[in-house]
Image: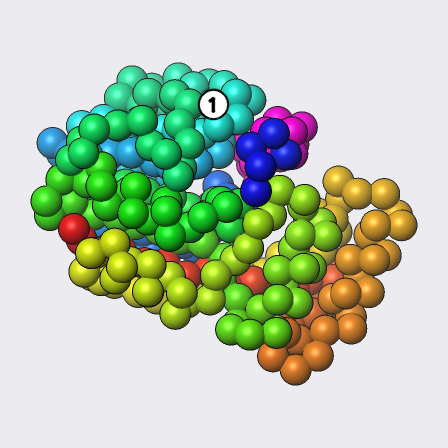
Amino acid sequence: MDHPTIRQQFGAHAGEYVDNPVHARGASLARLVALVPAQPGWEALDVATGAGHTAFAFAPRVARVRATDITPEMLALTRQGAAERGLDNVVAEPAEAEALPYKDGSFDLVTCRIAAHHFGDVDRFVREAARVLRPGGVLAVADNIVPAGPAGDYVNAFEKLRDPSHARCLCLDEWLAAFADAGLALMAGETVEKSIAFGRWAARHDPVMRRYLRAMLDQATGAAAEHLRPQSDGDGLAFRLVEGVLVGQR
């Protein structure tokens, strides 16, 4: 995905991510913290930090977190959030996920949560993350995953219709292959489910686009329908997404 599109999309909607329940309090955040054996002396890097939630979760557990993003509005929110929380060991700065501006072996931990589906080349990101890790360092990733094959293509098309900055969610096997190809030994790999309120998810669009999105959800069949599982949640329509949570060691 081209960077101007990503900056435009996330710049325009940056404020939505501060209190978004999936980003701020989703299950994958707690799982990353639980699965990573963070140490007080560690230097950490959070890639595509968004509003900084993952950086904030790890900051009390490590020496310093560099929270990076390509969107200035997101970095501003991260700085504000760190100041509000008294986290003076969080440094927010611009960096591209697929071309990290750091020397080899700079970090003990690299994290990236609910962001890689916006990257144009996830394999390159994983290789870059492995490059900047010290021997024994840890890469911890959580991102939306899709079924393999045409069902995954349908889910990706559904996501991209709502958000033009969406590039592609991988299936779990593709993530595992990316870790292996980068020389990372898998320490943990699991999935977590999340319920998405359709109304909030589609709220940035006009009624016409919301109808298109609703139609795609209603018309999903087979493995795509099983993955999305649209249903009434009592307050309106909801559907399911699945995140892969992977931790690997260099």
Does residue 210 lie above or below 131 as drawn? Answer: below
Q: Residue at x 60, y 48 (%)?
A: 166
The answer to whether residue 193 of the structure is visible from this angle is no
Res. 219 image quadrant: bottom right
Per the image, label 1 sits on a secondary structure element best described as helix
Does residue 196 lie above or below 240 as drawn? Answer: above
The one of 45 and 58 positioned closer to us in this rendering? 45
The one of 81 and 167 positioned closer to us in this rendering? 167
How many neighbours does mark 1 have within 10 angstroms: few (below 14), some (14-19), or many (20 or more)?
Answer: many
User: Would you name the residue on which mark 1 appears?
Assistant: 75
Residue 201 spot, x, y in % from top left = 68, 49
Q: Residue at x 33, y 49 (%)?
A: 126
Q: Residue furthest bottom?
A: 222
Q: Amino acid at mark 1?
A: Leu
For the record, the magenta segment spans: 6-20
Q: Residue at x 50, y 46 (%)?
A: 120
Does residue 21 lie above or below 89 as drawn? Answer: below
Quadrant position of the N terminus in the picture: top right
- In the image, 29: left or right of 133? right
- In the image, 19: left or right of 102? right
The answer to whether residue 150 of the structure is visible from this angle is yes
Residue 107 spot, x, y in % from top left = 19, 34
Q: Residue at x 61, y 66 (%)?
A: 153
Examine the structure image and report whether residue 80 is included in the region drawn in magenta.
Answer: no
Examine the structure image and report whether residue 15 is included in the region drawn in magenta.
Answer: yes
Does residue 65 lie above or below 225 as drawn? Answer: above
